Image (spheres, rainbow, N blue to C red):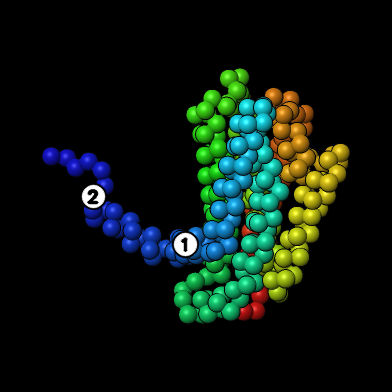
Amino acid sequence: MGSSGLSVGTLEDLRDTLEQNVLVTLFWHEVKQGFRSWLYRGWIILTFFFLFFFLLIDFTSGAEAGTGVVLLLYYFAFLGSLYSVVVGSAAITGEIDEIADSLLSKAVRRWEYIVSKYLSQVFLSLFVFTLIIGLASLILWAFDRVSDDLDWWNATTLVGMIALVVVFFTSAGLLFSTLASRTVFAFLMGMGVWFVLIFLFAVNPQWDFMYSPIHILNNWDLIMEGAWDIDWWKLVSFYVATPLVCVGVSLLAFYQRDL
């Protein structure tokens, strides 16, 4: 009789292969450390609080259906980006002694360490984002708070852009953490980027700069209607290419660093 599915031996071989892959091992180690972090757990708890708070506004204020998700997107663009850049800024400079020990005592190459940092931090950031936005959307759908004429493609575009914003600030924090000699310097550089792209546009909503996350969200209604007249390829390219550039610059800087 033919066997269906993977055999036990095949699964064990796959597990052994993954365990021997340094990049995968480092990635899962960083993810586990992230879930154990009191800061990350606190971030999840705070985000759940705002989830239920914004849903309460959606259900009780007579607001337009789906307002809760839009408010959550503002939350992630403002506080989510701040959290990402702060945590990213301490991810490497805050572990410089441990880095040296790891590279010297184990068969860990520098590029594996840097790439694992980027992958794990992006995963942790997007995990919370996807969980909360997905849960909010499911609750609104279950209680018939989703408009019948909703264009799901446009809605996905809006959510996807804010997801890229989260990745952008996570990558920026990690880049500065690689370049700076101390965590405080990395933190100040990350806060500078956040201040320019987020805070200034939050207090000056009339400013017109399509690369600002706040400006993107201020046009959420046009995006949902598919009527925002911009060069989308430029906007998407900026938020996709910049994190890749951050990885490349981090690798170059880290290989030049004296550990």
Q: Residues within 10 Å of mark 2 (few under 14, many from 20)?
A: few
Residue appearing at x 59%, y 43% in the figure: 51
Query: Which residue sits at x=86%, y=38%?
Result: 206
197 vs 138: above or below: below
Mark toward the start of the polypeptide (1 vs 2): 2
> Would residue 184 be seen by someone viewing this image from the given angle?
yes
- Single out the mark in the foreground, 1 or 2: 1
- Residue 157 in view here: no
Residue 205 located left or right of residue 237? right
Determine whether, in the image, residue 149 is placed left or right of residue 19.
right
Horizontal placement of 253 versus 209: left or right? left
**Residue where numbered disc 1 is placed:** 32
Q: x, y (%) of residue 203?
A: 83, 46
User: 3 or 210: nearer the eye?
Assistant: 210
Question: Is label 1 in a helix, a strand or a loop?
Answer: helix
Where is residue 21 drawn, in percent x and y? 42, 63
**In terms of secondary structure, where does tag 2 sit?**
loop
Residue 119 position within the rendered picture, expressed as x and y whole percent measured from the top left:
55, 56
- At 57% from the left edge and 58% from the top edge, which residue is drawn? 42
| Residue 144, numbered label | none
| Residue 7 numbered tag | 2
Disc 1 marks a residue whose amino acid type is Lys
| Quarter of the rendering occupied by the N terminus | top left
Quarter of the image for residue 4 reads: top left
- Against 239, residue 156 (above or below) is above
Residue 238 at x, y percent in the picture: 72, 45
